[in-house]
Amino acid sequence: MASVKFLLFSSTLFFVALSFSVAQPSFRPDALVLPVSKDASTLQYLTHINQRTPLVDVKVVVDLGGQFLWVDCEQGYVSSSYIPARCNSAQCLLAKASGCGECNSPPKPGCNNNTCSLLPDNTVTRTATSGELAADVVSVQSTDGSNPRRVVTVTRSLFTCGSTFLLEGLASGAKGMAGLGRARIGLPSQFSVAFSFHRKFALCLSSSTTSNGVLFFGDGPYVMLPNIDVSTSLIFTPLIVNPVSTASAYTQGDPSTEYFIGVKSIKISENAISLNTSLLWINNDGIGGTKISTVNPYTVMETTIYNAFTEAFIKEAAVMNLTRVAPTAPFGVCYSIKNIGSTRVGPAVPTIDLVLQSESVYWRIFGANSMVQVGDNALCLGFVDGGVNARTSIVIGGYQLENNLLQFDLASSRLGFSSSLLFRQTTCSNFNFTSNA
Ligand SMILES: *[C@@H]1O[C@H](CO)[C@@H](O)[C@H](O)[C@H]1NC(C)=O
Ligand SMILES: *[C@@H]1O[C@H](CO)[C@@H](O)[C@H](O)[C@H]1NC(C)=O
Ligand SMILES: *[C@@H]1O[C@H](CO)[C@@H](O)[C@H](O)[C@H]1NC(C)=O
Ligand SMILES: *[C@@H]1O[C@H](CO)[C@@H](O)[C@H](O)[C@H]1NC(C)=O
């Protein structure tokens, strides 16, 4: 087992590399891999993190834009390697954790004197609380891109202690949330610093609740059966920083850790729809723009965008002779399944293009990612109305991400996306999790 201490500053990277070569002359991981499942009742995406001593398999909700890993320390947290972050320590500085906490109960994980704290955030229910910053052991399988390989360990991986009540609204059995956001203590940054690999990670969500999708930390290859490297032929677009935090509770001046992209217009069947484009920009108060989220099961659009979008879709669907039926909540537009043809990329319906930095760069959404089957007879447009006061104008949700590989490159601040893998005759549930270590 390779093992390193969590690193505080990149200037010390050299020393880590050194301690690696001493401990494990033959092995340094280039990437790590975790399975991601889809919970049938909440539509949340879940992964498992092996944490603590002795190791415990902790089920957590994947929160793409979340600030850090947080877990419930109130109930059942037992670990001989738990280390609370002392006030003004390098860990507190790195995490930008302020304050100096006291706890009036007997000391235990989540309750120690002289520790700094952060605000663990249940982004599903939008509830945050204060929680102790701490470090503990985390073990993850490395990968060569095709299979899992040996388990590697980060001996001091930073996370925040949440409370039991903060788990409300999460999938059954979940003990916290795994934040993959752009904070320095987000899991992608911590893993890349610990193993000195590329500050990149990739998410490939399965559309099935019975087979796993995959999360990679580090660069490709990302190989799906039958031997298709889906890290090739990605389309790139800049990631945008929202200067104002979008967390449920935050300190003024904190930027958002979520991933925003620059959608400039939307086309349906290649015809641009008319929108109030100022909603597509992030204003000085952090309002507007387009982000990607795994805690929203379907894409959410500000009301005027939603109305223009659905009207245009209805018009283009009429050209294709689709028959509307009464809608089923939360959807507003549904069709009879009867006269909809099928294609390799799902039901034959109007295509939806999110046009990015130029007319020639767009994210095309096909039927498999736009239409949700409701009952036996209907297919509904899987987009929902976010209201007139939506903080973010477009939130691209989980259903629209499934079977698309998304690579987040934090160093060069860009997103690589594959478009539907169904075109390439594979899916996100085709990573070969059989270990060849
Ligand atoms: C924290 O300090 C207070 C006052 O000294 C003490 O009563 C309390 O038990 C301590 N709590 C912990 C968790 O050590
Ligand atoms: C467009 O949206 C902006 C931001 O919400 C708003 O201030 C403006 O009035 C809108 N313009 C129109 C023409 O509706
Ligand atoms: C739709 O129906 C009309 C009238 O029946 C027909 O002329 C047209 O070809 C159909 N269009 C498509 C795309 O099937
Ligand atoms: C999955 O990987 C294992 C280990 O390398 C290999 O033995 C097996 O043949 C692979 N499965 C498929 C379907 O290729």
Image (cartoon, grey):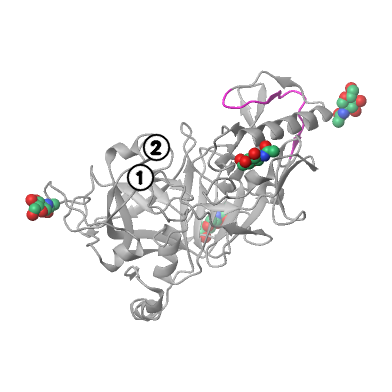
Q: Residue at x 73, y 55 (%)?
A: 361
Q: Which range is magenta?
A: 329-343
With 308 as the anchor, is 231 left or right in this view? left
The verdict on label 1 being within 8 Å of ligand 1 is no
Q: Give the amino acid at mark 1.
A: Gly
Q: Quadrant of the N terminus?
A: bottom left
Q: Is residue 165 left or right of residue 369?
A: left
Q: Nearer the viewer, residue 64 or 376?
A: 64
Q: Is residue 404 above or below residue 318?
A: below
Q: Is mark 2 within 8 Å of ligand 1?
A: no
- Residue in the foreground of this view, choosing between 21 and 371: 371
Secondary structure mainly formed by the magenta segment: loop
Above or below, 143 against 124 in this view is below
Across and down, in percent, residue 192 comes to 45, 67
Asked if the magenta segment contains residue 70, the reply would be: no
What residue is shown with label 2? 170
> Residue beneath label 1, please?
176
Tag 2 and tag 1, C-beta contact below 8 Å? yes
Frontmost residue, 52 versus 229: 52
Q: Secondary structure at mark 2?
A: loop
> Where does the image place residue 243, in percent across and percent down from the top left?
50, 55
Amino acid beneath label 2: Leu
Residue at 71%, 24% in the rendered image: 335
Residue 218 lies left or right of residue 83; in this view the side is: right
| Placement of 161 over or under 97, stated as above or below | above
Q: Is residue 227 visible?
A: no
Residue 365 point in image, percent of width and height: 69, 43
The quadrant of the picture showing ligand 4 is bottom right
Disc number at residue 86? none
Is 157 or 271 nearer to us in this picture?
271
